[in-house]
């Protein structure tokens, strides 16, 4: 007997799971979304904004980084819809885009602290 003689595919289970599988494009978007969380600087910025709405200069001062480095990371976070901004005079304030980001950060931290 060949080595595949004892392999049995449960087609019903395979079909059921396949129906629930998101399309490839959505999975790619999800992978790109999670890549953003793979950078410690971006995570620091997100945690700062979890606590308080802030401008670039305050974030840079708090994290001990240059304003241009923080601005670059904020652009990435804004492109991925993780942060939003509002203008007050000449100052732009940043905050988390929505409650989903709070949940993702909180659950991620809970998971690694277990």
Image (cartoon, rainbow, N blue to C red):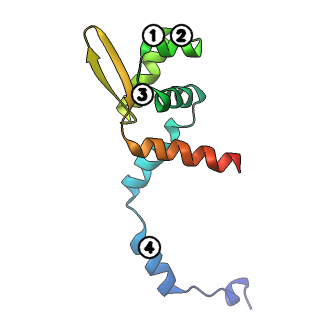
Q: Is residue 82 above or below residue 9?
A: above
| Label 2: how many Cα within 10 Å (few below 14, some 14–19, many 20+) | few
Residue 76's label in the rendered image is 3
Q: Seen from this angle, which residue lies furthest bottom?
A: 1
* Residue drawn at (71%, 51%) of the image: 114
Residue at disc 1, secondary structure: helix
Residue at disc 2, secondary structure: helix
Q: Position of residue 15 (x, y in %)?
A: 44, 80
Q: Where is residue 99 in the image (x, y as percent from the top left)?
A: 40, 44
* Residue drawn at (28%, 7%) of the image: 90
Mark before the other along the chain sequence, 3 or 4: 4
The answer to whether the residue labelled 2 contacts the one labelled 4, judged by CB atoms less than 8 Å apart, is no
Mark before the other along the chain sequence, 1 or 3: 1
Residue 57's label in the rendered image is 1
* Residue drawn at (46%, 42%) of the image: 102
Q: Name the residue under label 4.
A: 18
Q: Where is residue 95 in the image (x, y as percent from the top left)?
A: 39, 28
Q: In this view, does 80 lie to the left or right of 13?
A: left
| Label 3: how many Cα within 10 Å (few below 14, some 14–19, many 20+) | some
Mark before the other along the chain sequence, 2 or 3: 2
The answer to whether the residue labelled 1 contacts the one labelled 2, judged by CB atoms less than 8 Å apart, is yes
Q: Name the residue under label 2.
A: 61
Q: Is residue 33 left or right of residue 37?
A: left
Residue at disc 4, secondary structure: helix
Distance Cα–Cα, label 1 vs label 3: 17 Å
The answer to whether the residue labelled 2 contacts the one labelled 3, judged by CB atoms less than 8 Å apart, is no
């Amino acid at each position: 007997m060949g080595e595949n003689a004892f392999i049995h595919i449960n087609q019903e289970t395979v079909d059921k799971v396949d129906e629930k599988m998101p399309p490839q494009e959505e999975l790619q978007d999800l992978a790109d979304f999670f890549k953003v969380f793979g950078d410690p600087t971006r995570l620091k910025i997100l945690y700062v904004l979890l606590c308080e709405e802030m401008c670039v200069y305050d974030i840079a001062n708090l994290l001990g980084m240059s304003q241009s480095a923080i601005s670059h990371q904020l652009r990435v976070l804004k492109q991925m819809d993780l942060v939003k901004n509002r203008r007050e005079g000449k100052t732009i304030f940043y905050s988390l885009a929505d409650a989903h980001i709070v949940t993702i950060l909180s659950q991620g931290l809970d998971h690694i602290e277990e």
